[in-house]
Image: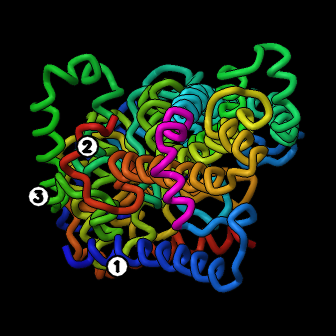
């Protein structure tokens, strides 16, 4: 059941940002996924979920509930044991080719400079791949402008180990979107950062998303992060995971940090928190 | 620059101290030269009999290098296969461990039976003794690729080959070069061992011939030269390692970044 929070009087959500009015990009239909040698350990069971094209969805839930597993399903890295996953109108049968991913661990290549790390997807994804020699300068400029967007104008020639954890995560974010992915999957990407860096990166991500409108699924255990960034927040149950609550966040865009201290914001966070507490019991 | 000098000076002094101690002990205890010659006697022998030692040493060096090169090619290939495919690893690894447990000195007579006395068994022994650490290290380097990185690449359509070339191989380079340092010294040991058992050329053969005619200073002169060559080969391996994998020891190698794949 979708719970739509009351529109805030005097503020209007733009039509284009209302998620359910748009066609679905990800459709997960009654999916189960089992682990283990015998296949008897269920990670997900009866999970159904829709993410609209261009929507920013967040998935929250108790730890170990299969949040990351969901991302593996959505990217085709794992196939469901039962049920179906449709992404971009096609049944997922193997790894997709248009995804950008970022994890809690930046996972940069230590032998490459930052800009070379950002350019990695351009060496693999078509059509960039076949033009990578001819358009090298163009690709480089593209990576450089992204680094500037995330606040690292001078990091291009530096190696990852010469940067702080927060800076490395910014580079990882650039790598996740440099090839203009149609789907961005973020797995606890901001969890290991200090509070200020984290909040700064929320705004960086939001502005990139507003500008490029890639469909995004963010897995997180930080409810403030989920509510601040997402159009819809889905709450996953404990194992085996399924959606127990979906909440459309009616806050206007672009969101700005002050909204986080608004009582209406706190209401939503509180409600989600209770849902998770229920799920844990 | 000062620090560089110290870096060289300290180990050089230790070696000199060791040699001085050896010299002093031999002289004080009046050890006869056919038991343990002093370093000075050995060096004199090295200089006076250079024309005998050097051709043999050069032969051993070439034999070692040949065996070592085969090791590198074979070790890299098998290591990559092991790292890339768990099935291959599980199937072949027990066999490899079993083979590696066989004392190679016992294999030399068999090699001689197959290939005759001389260079071929020495090259093969050098190879057999030195390839194992390369295989194990390269496989470990590739197998420990971060799963997140593999996910990132697979979800943008990278093939297994892409992942191996972009991530697995560069990642295993530090392991590979670390193993080269072990392998080169093992290759030396293998070559000399085989020459001792069955050859009429090389340092191993020379030492055996010299000791059977009680020319012990000549034996030690050969040993000193072999030790020196071993250190030199090790040093070359270290330099190559630093050049290619400065990133792993966090040395700024930006001017070499063009070699990154």
Q: Is residue B213 magenta?
A: no
| Residue that carries the numbered disc 1 in the rendered image | A195
Identify the residue under disc 2: A116
Between disc 3 and disc 1, whose residue precedes?
Answer: 3
Judging depth in this view, the residue of B122 and A93 nearest the camera is B122
What's drawn in magenta, residue-wise?
A: B40-57
Mark 2 neighbour density, 10 Å: few (under 14) some (14–19) many (20 or more): many
Q: Say which of A216 and B176 sits in front.
A: B176
Q: Is residue A184 left or right of residue B103?
A: left
Name the N-terminal-most of marks 3 and 2: 2
- Towards the viewer: A55 or B66: B66
Image location of residue A174, percent across then percent down: 27, 49
Q: Name the residue beneath numbered marker 3.
A: A153
From the viewer's side, name the closer residue of A174 and B94.
B94
- Report whether residue A18 is seen: no
Would you identify the image quadrant in which residue B118 lies? top right
């Amino acid at each position: 059941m979708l719970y739509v929070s009351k529109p805030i009087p005097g503020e209007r959500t733009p039509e284009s940002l209302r998620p359910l009015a748009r066609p679905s990009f990800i459709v997960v239909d009654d999916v189960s996924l089992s682990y283990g040698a015998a296949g008897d350990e269920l990670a997900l069971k009866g999970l159904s979920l829709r993410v609209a094209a261009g929507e920013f969805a967040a998935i929250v839930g108790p730890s170990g509930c299969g949040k990351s597993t969901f991302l593996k399903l959505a990217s085709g890295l794992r196939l469901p044991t039962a049920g179906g996953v449709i992404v971009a109108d096609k049944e997922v049968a193997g790894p997709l080719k248009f995804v950008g991913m970022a994890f809690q661990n930046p996972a940069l290549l230590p032998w490459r400079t930052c800009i070379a790390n950002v350019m990695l997807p351009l060496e693999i994804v078509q059509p960039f791949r076949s033009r990578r020699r001819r358009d090298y300068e163009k690709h480089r400029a593209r990576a450089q402008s992204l680094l500037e967007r995330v606040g690292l104008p001078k990091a291009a020639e530096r190696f990852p180990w010469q940067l702080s954890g927060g800076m490395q995560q910014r580079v990882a974010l650039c790598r996740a979107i440099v090839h203009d992915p149609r789907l961005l999957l973020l797995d606890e990407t901001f969890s290991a950062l200090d509070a200020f860096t984290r909040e700064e990166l929320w705004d960086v991500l939001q502005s990139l998303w507003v500008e490029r409108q890639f469909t995004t699924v963010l897995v997180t255990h930080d409810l403030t992060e989920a509510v601040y960034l997402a159009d819809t927040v889905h709450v996953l149950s404990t194992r085996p995971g399924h959606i127990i609550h979906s909440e459309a966040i009616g806050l206007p865009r672009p969101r700005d940090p002050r909204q986080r201290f608004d009582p209406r914001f706190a209401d939503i966070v509180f409600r989600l928190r209770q849902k998770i507490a229920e799920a844990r019991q | 620059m000062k620090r560089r000098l110290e870096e060289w000076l300290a180990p050089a002094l230790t070696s000199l101290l060791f040699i001085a101690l050896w010299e002093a002990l031999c002289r004080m205890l009046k050890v006869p030269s056919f038991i343990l010659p002093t370093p000075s006697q050995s060096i004199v022998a090295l200089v006076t009999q250079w024309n005998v030692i050097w051709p043999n040493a050069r032969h051993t060096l070439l034999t070692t290098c040949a065996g070592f090169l085969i090791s590198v090619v074979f070790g890299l290939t098998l290591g990559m296969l092991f790292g890339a495919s768990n099935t291959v690893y599980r199937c072949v690894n027990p066999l490899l461990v079993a083979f590696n447990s066989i004392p190679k000195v016992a294999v030399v007579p068999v090699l001689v039976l197959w290939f005759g006395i001389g260079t071929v068994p020495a090259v093969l022994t050098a190879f057999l003794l030195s390839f194992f650490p390369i295989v194990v290290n390269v496989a470990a380097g590739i197998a420990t690729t971060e799963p997140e990185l593999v996910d990132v690449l697979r979800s943008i359509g990278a093939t297994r080959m892409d992942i191996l070339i972009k991530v697995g191989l560069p990642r295993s380079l530090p392991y590979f070069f670390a193993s080269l340092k072990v392998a080169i010294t093992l290759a030396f040991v293998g070559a000399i061992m085989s020459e001792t058992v069955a050859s009429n050329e090389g340092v191993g053969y020379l030492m055996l011939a010299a000791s059977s005619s009680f020319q012990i200073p000549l034996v030690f002169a050969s040993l000193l030269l072999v030790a020196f060559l071993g250190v030199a080969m090790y040093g070359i391996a270290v330099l190559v390692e630093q050049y290619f994998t400065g990133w792993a020891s966090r040395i700024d190698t930006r001017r070499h970044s063009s070699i990154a794949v």
